[in-house]
Image (cartoon, rainbow, N blue to C red):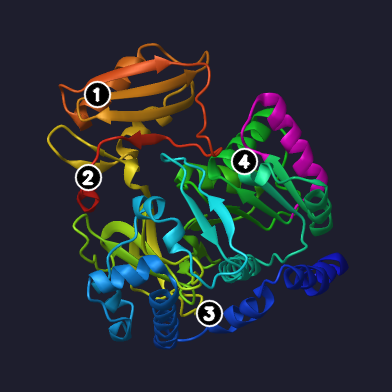
Amino acid sequence: MSPHTWLISKLVFPLQERLKQHDTVRVWRALEASQWWTPHQLADFQAQRLQALLAHAAQHVPYYRQLFQAHNICVDEIHSAQDLQRLPFLTKADIRAHLDDLKADDARGLARFNTGGSSGEPLIFFIGNERVSHDVAAKWRATRWWGVDIGDPEIVVWGSPIELGSQDRLRLLRDKLMRTKLLPAFEMSPAKLDGFIREIRTMRPKMLFGYPSSLSLIALHAEQRGIAMNDLGIKVAFVTSERLYDHQRATIQRVFGCPVANGYGGRDAGFIAHQCPSGGMHITSEDIIVEIVAADGSPVPPGGSGEIVVTHLATKDFPFIRYKTGDVGVLDDKPCSCGRGLPLLKEIQGRTTDFVVAQNGTVMHGLALVYIVRDLPGVKAFKIIQENVDYTRILLATDDQFAETALQTIITGFKQRLGADVRIEIERVMDVPKEASGKFRYIVSKVSGMSVERGT
């Protein structure tokens, strides 16, 4: 640890968190110990926190007080994560309809947040100091798995207007002290990418953090320019907020000369899971209960695919209890070789809207279509939009290496998977726009009522 990193992580950052009335340091120290507990110890601790959250919600949160009464739910009978199945789900529509009633009547210091709206209408919700402290502590623990601490130089490639809009003088001063540099992921033109590469080479960060699409694009641009990026001493590239594809991981690792650590979470659901150097995607189970459910709401056992449902145990001020994330994943029942007792996510397959439905009703992951387009020579960027089961369109940006005969290859491949009678429309564009949040999505399906557990 360098003297600057020691100063920041041991003195400056703890002082900042104390001034913000955040309990981050205490929570982080507890997490450093609890990650080595046995699964049984973690489950017992989780159950205690769940009971406390439900008791507080029943007494102080109007929405849950009314919900529990309407469904004759006695929270004293909820003793474990399995007992959560007695409770209804919390959906984005529920939060929009009951925003004020979801606030605890004893909440203090609530801050308004919203999602980026990359999969539809942004979601507005509130976060209290307890939730912030636990999420920051969980991320801090995960970065330390890779030998990176608060105060080590960091490049963040991000596109959320929430972050980009908060760059006032105080924030800029703090970031400079913390050695964090934010690069906006909204515009990724060749000139911008040249500038990003110069910034990274100048700063020589210990860690990269950002969208996998953005980091892989920077890596490819550097490679095309013949600029080496593997001599900077980067220890790890953290990627999050989008599905990490194998080709993106390979590109980032090859160009930057560092491992890629996948992270899963959301502004709404919290810091859910992160990959350790041994490869396990560890759930932050001290704070978060993860369920996998089928389309009918029934539980899916480990190894089965379904929607990820989250209960965040540090959300008493604005509870997220059995919150349907809209993401699809698989739990693992095997331990990680690192020795941590934290449970594992075996796979994160993407959003429910990342799955497409063929005319005959077959549900498949959008990768079945992505691979048809992605590896064609001359394809710069693309986006697949399934408007309905009978019509799919593709936004396609190409360069001089693209053969026009490949258009028929795309159409034929799509029809083979979606149905011979499906209308496939290819729209040639100069560039494929990102989502409003700055994220990039290869595929979006607008077909509703998908049974994602049937995906192949």
Nearest to N terminus: mark 2 or mark 3: 3
Mark toward the viewer: 4 or 3: 4
- Circle count: 4
Mark toward the viewer: 4 or 2: 4
Question: Any magenta on residue 399?
Answer: no
In the image shown, does 355 or 435 lie closer to the viewer? 435
Q: Amino acid at mark 4?
A: Pro
On the image, numbered disc 3 is attached to which residue? 35
Rendered residue at 59%/43% (across/down): 160
- The CA span between labels 2 and 1 is 16 Å
Q: Are marks 3 and 1 in contact (CB under 8 Å)?
A: no
- The CA span between labels 4 and 3 is 34 Å
On the image, numbered disc 1 is attached to which residue? 391
- The CA span between labels 4 and 2 is 31 Å
Q: Secondary structure at mark 4?
A: helix
The secondary structure that most of the magenta stretch takes on is: helix
| Residue farthest toward the left in the current orientation of the protein | 360
Mark toward the viewer: 3 or 1: 1
Dot 3 crowding, Cα within 10 Å, few <14, some 14–19, many 20+: many
- The CA span between labels 4 and 1 is 33 Å
Nearest to N terminus: mark 4 or mark 3: 3
Rendered residue at 56%/45% (across/down): 211
Nearest to N terminus: mark 4 or mark 1: 4
Nearest to N terminus: mark 4 or mark 2: 4
Q: Amino acid at mark 3?
A: Gln
Q: Which residues are magenta?
A: 184-205
Q: Amino acid at mark 2?
A: Met
Q: Amino acid at mark 1?
A: Tyr
